[in-house]
Image: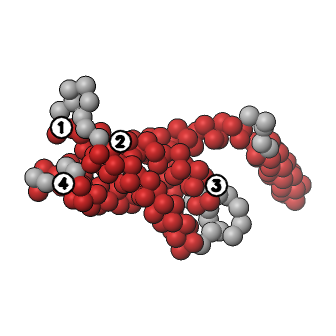
Amino acid sequence: MERRGHERDTNDHVRRNAFASVLLAVDETPSVAAPRQSLIKQFFRFGVVGVINTIVDLAVLNLLIVATDTGRTGAMFAFFKTVAFVCAVVNSYLMNRSWTFKRVQKKSQMLEGSQFLTVNLLGLLVNVGTSWYAATYTHPIAGINPKWWPSLAALVGTGFSLAFNFLGYKFWVFAHRKH
């Protein structure tokens, strides 16, 4: 009698596990809309991380300008903007890796890090180059206070590097494929 009860418990367990496997399989089956929803979700998260990175970038840039009372234009601006950019990139890597794109577990962390660095070095040229040009060769318009011009120039650089970085992260750095 005890043997039959054990068999029944085992059969119930097998049925429950089979049912759970079916549910998991159904859940894992991609719908037609799933890739688009995933892309929208990733781009939204990338945007949130980008806002945080922009705050880090502007805070460091303005802290350096205020602390030294220089660097509103020219070479010092480019140097300060580079330091601020590097601080924002460190934050970007940590947040995008863990939240926006999720880390590819089988991918070497060294490879992922070097790809991230490559995308960001190219992004640095775009970001710092365009913001330096805006800060150095354009002048405040519409009565904008010159003290705010470096921050606005930094935002110009951020805008130019946004699409470049997203595409580099999504399709190369955090791409879910075997390496």
Q: Earlier in the sequence, mark 1 or mark 3?
A: 1
Q: Position of residue 126 (x, y in %)?
A: 44, 53
Identified by mark 1, the residue type is: Pro
Q: Earlier in the sequence, mark 4 or mark 2?
A: 4
Q: Is residue 45 above or below residue 96?
A: above
> Residue 71 bears which disc, if any?
4
Identified by mark 2, the residue type is: Leu
Judge whether residue 52 can be spotted in this image: no
> Residue 146 bears which disc, if any?
1
Please tell me whether mark 2 or mark 3 is closer to you in this view. Answer: 2
Q: Name the residue located 80 percent from the left edge and 44 percent from the top edge.
A: 29
Q: Position of residue 137 (x, y in %)?
A: 29, 45
Q: Position of residue 24 (x, y in %)?
A: 76, 46
Colour scheme in use? secondary structure
Q: Is residue 54 above or below residue 171?
A: above
Q: Is residue 101 or residue 160 the one in the foreground?
A: 160
Please tell me whether mark 1 or mark 2 is closer to you in this view. Answer: 1
Q: Dot 4, crowdedness within 10 Å: few (<14), some or many (≥20)?
A: some
Disc 1 to disc 4, C-alpha distance: 13 Å
Say which residue label 2 marks: 155
Q: Earlier in the sequence, mark 1 or mark 2?
A: 1
Q: Quadrant of residue 75?
A: bottom left
Q: Quadrant of the C terminus?
A: bottom right
Q: Quadrant of the N terminus?
A: bottom right
Kindly state the secondary structure of the residue where label 3 is placed. Answer: helix
Disc 3 to disc 4, C-alpha distance: 36 Å
Identified by mark 3, the residue type is: Phe
Disc 1 to disc 2, C-alpha distance: 15 Å
Q: Earlier in the sequence, mark 1 or mark 4?
A: 4
Say which residue label 3 marks: 171
Query: Looking at the image, how many numbered discs can be counted on the residues?
Result: 4
Disc 4 to disc 2, C-alpha distance: 16 Å
